[in-house]
Image (cartoon, rainbow, N blue to C red):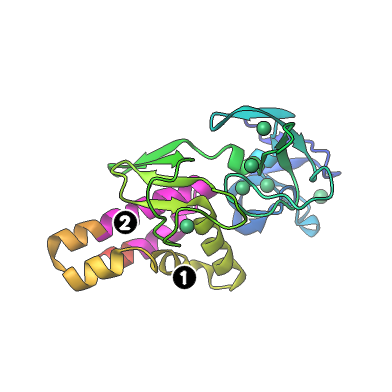
């Protein structure tokens, strides 16, 4: 359930659910965010929370980690650096952690990643099994000894680590050329240049188009709806 206004323990003012004009850094989990989020109406506060972070229940579960009971924490309990089991990135703020000795950790947003998403006849699935190599890093595993989750197309040929997509987007955001280069960055390791360029022809174009559609779905599954942000660029590249 989503509320349009919330009082949150992490901020003294009431927060409103509104669309952020620019990408923001969530003041809860410290991860990047786009679009609809909880914001302090006082501009000088510059305070944002992901919807998932503002509405995080005190405990949760995940179908990929069936035996774990996850509890919400404002910050990592204990002194060890923690990494998110889903995206592999380090945890710098809000998190879920299970009570097992080898504890699992999830960013609140990663705990809520959609299991599947479809549009324009393409469908992607969230997977914790490594079936094929990630098109971005060309590997099956991500760093930090964490396997990490990925999004896989229904045909099984397109696979992207959540970690790799998040990292590419964050790099672009920090580089300040966000709107221009997100899709370029993401396509570097994809087959689109090769397929559309070298092999050419209708089938090459079709495969390149499919890749773009799947990339848009993956970005949108991970970040909510930045698709509006990149779709014009993607469209321009496809035409
Ligand atoms: Zn957050
Ligand atoms: Zn405030
Ligand atoms: Zn556990
Ligand atoms: Zn994560
Ligand atoms: Zn683990
Ligand atoms: Zn990867």
Labels 1 and 2 touching (C-beta < 8 A): no
> As drawn, is 122 to the left or to the right of 81?
left
119 and 85: which is toward the camera: 85
> As drawn, is 87 to the left or to the right of 236?
right
Return the residue found at the far left: 201
Q: Residue at x 26, y 60 (%)?
A: 208
Measuring from the top left, give residue 127's x and y in whole percent.
Answer: 45, 40
Disc 2, SS: helix
Return the residue found at the far right: 12
Q: Residue at x 23, y 57 (%)?
A: 207
Q: Residue at x 28, y 53 (%)?
A: 210
- Pick whichever of labels 1 and 2 is earlier in the sequence: 1
The residue pinned by badge 2 equals: 211
Measuring from the top left, give residue 148's x and y in whole percent.
Answer: 54, 48
Does 225 lie within the magenta span? yes
Compared with 217, 3 (above or below) is above
Q: Residue at x 54, y 48 (%)?
A: 147
Give the magenta-colored segment's residue range.
208-234
Compared with 61, 13 (above or below) is below
**Observer able to see residue 51:** no
Measuring from the top left, give residue 204's x and y in whole percent.
Answer: 19, 62
Residue 236, which numbered label? none
The residue pinned by badge 1 equals: 181
Image quarter hosting the N terminus: top right
């Amino acid at each position: 359930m989503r509320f349009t206004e919330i009082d949150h323990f992490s901020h003294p003012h009431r927060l409103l659910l509104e669309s952020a004009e620019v990408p923001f850094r969530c003041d809860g989990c410290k991860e990047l965010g786009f679009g609809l989020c909880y914001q302090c109406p006082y501009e000088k506060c510059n305070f944002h929370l992901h919807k998932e972070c503002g509405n995080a229940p005190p405990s949760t579960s995940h179908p990929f980690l069936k035996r774990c009971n996850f509890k919400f924490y404002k910050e990592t309990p204990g002194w060890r650096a923690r990494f998110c089991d889903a995206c592999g990135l380090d945890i710098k703020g809000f998190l879920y952690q299970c009570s097992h000795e080898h504890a699992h950790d999830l960013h609140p947003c990663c705990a809520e990643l959609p299991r599947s998403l479809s549009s324009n006849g393409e469908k992607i699935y969230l997977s914790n099994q490594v079936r094929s190599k990630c098109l971005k890093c060309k590997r099956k595993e991500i760093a930090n000894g964490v396997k990490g989750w990925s999004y896989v197309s229904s045909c099984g040929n397109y696979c992207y680590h959540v970690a790799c997509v998040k990292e590419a987007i964050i790099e672009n955001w920090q580089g300040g050329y966000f709107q221009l280069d997100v899709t370029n960055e993401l396509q570097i390791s994809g087959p689109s240049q090769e397929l559309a360029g070298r092999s050419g022809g209708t089938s090459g174009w079709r495969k390149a188009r499919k890749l773009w559609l799947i990339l848009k779905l993956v970005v949108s599954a991970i970040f909510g709806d930045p698709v509006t942000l990149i779709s014009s660029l993607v469209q321009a590249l496809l035409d």
